Image: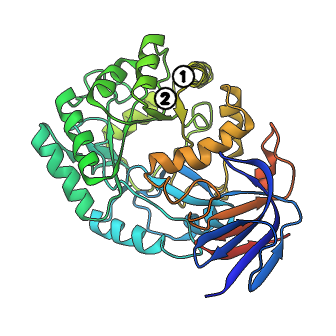
Amino acid sequence: MKKILLKNAAVHDALNWGMTSDILVEGDVIAELGTGLSGDIEIDMKGAAVLPGFFDAHVHLVSGDEKLSDEALRQWAFNGVTTVRDMGFGGKQSLEDFMNWVNKTSASEQMSKCPAAGRFVTALHGYGHIMGGHENGIPVGFPDEARAAVRKLYSLGASGIKTAADREPGRDDTPVLSTETFAAIADECEKLGIWCGAHVLSADFLPLLVEAGIPEMAHIPLDHIPDELLDEMVRKEIYITPTLQPINAPRPPLPPGELPPEMKKIIEAMSKIDTAEQERIAIDNVKRFFKKGGRVAFGTDTMRMQGSPEVQGIAVKELQLLHKAGLSVKDAVTAATLNSAHVCKMDKTHGTIETGKKADIIAVGSVIDETFEAFSSITFVMNKGVIIRQEL
């Protein structure tokens, strides 16, 4: 097994910010950090800022009639996002086919790892029951049904569970699970050692999820969250993955194929939302949560592997919005690395540059500052211990 030595690296992660060190990689693991090390292959990093591979802890790879394609995972990896988490499969393929594909594909060194939730576990006709224009969530009504759904998804290869407590746009009567059923989902996930997150965009539903013990809020409510509730979330060490980027942004492309009338109504209702005001409120919620000591992870809610005209990579805008919400440059990078590794249950092996952790390592070609534009110029990517990009 050849040893790769990355010399003269300026390590930037949650533990060290600018520490100069050599990094010795053996196989897919960081074997040693220090000076005076030697390897079979030596690469001079020339003082470049070197970081753990980034995470995007909230994406949706497939929706509607889209076909399974490796291209987005390949782009993410090449551009420094070595792990993306699929937070709800909305395609028309079978759940078994999707889980087999994503687990096989993401094992490649050329592609990002992709821990995936599979289908939403949600109320019948509740939020997440319809994705990509058709019913495909796993509907449950009682705690025993919820536990069985969690176990089924786990048996198919899901590494975590996505649930939801929210109203569909234009539907005030959207069904929502009970506290006891949400608690059963969280408890079953804990027993299995997998992650659990809940979609939530309305502060009305936060107390329900907090009481149930859901450990991660996917998104951030777009209306004001009371300080007392934020305090409780901090006490319970609940993470948020706020996905600020898509709030005041053009809507993603529609899934291909004919949409049912119910889905069309939802899209029409969403198009009338005052997203600029919602972005301001969401940023304020994150700012107050973070100031109280709350932990923030990084996700973009990127939709569809084929519909987006943009090349997938590190979302500079999300970093900028987190900074606007009070996170320092280092805090924003920590959100996209160690904190996101934590919500993906991968922090013991990923998220920092430490001896014994996996060798997902990236470098940027300019100084990291408040613009975060350095992350638009990735010069080096090592994914699963294999160099897939080198432009030093």
Q: Position of residue 314 (x, y in %)?
A: 67, 52
Residue 186 in which image quadrant: top left
Relative side of 385 to 170, left or right:
right
The residue under label 1 is which amino acid type? Phe
- Visible in this render: residue 302? no
Residue under the point 42% across and 32% down: 238
The residue under label 2 is which amino acid type? Ile
Quadrant containing the N terminus is bottom right
Which mark lies nearer to you, 2 or 1? 1
Which type of secondary structure does the marked residue at label 1 adopt? Answer: helix
Q: Nearest the camera: 368 or 98?
A: 368
Q: Nearest the camera: 94 or 43?
A: 43
Real-space CA distance between mark 2 and mark 1, rounded to the nearest whole angstrom: 10 Å
Residue 275 in which image quadrant: top right
- Numbered tag placed on residue 289 in the rendering: 1
Q: Is residue 14 above or below residue 201?
A: below
Residue under the point 74% across and 81% down: 39
Residue under the point 61% across and 24% down: 283
Please say if the residues under marks 2 and 1 sit with CB atoms less than 8 Å apart.
yes
- Numbered tag placed on residue 220 in the rendering: 2
Quadrant containing the C terminus is bottom right
Q: Position of residue 124 (x, y in %)?
A: 19, 38
Q: Is residue 364 above or below residue 68?
A: above
Q: Earlier in the sequence, mark 2 or mark 1?
A: 2
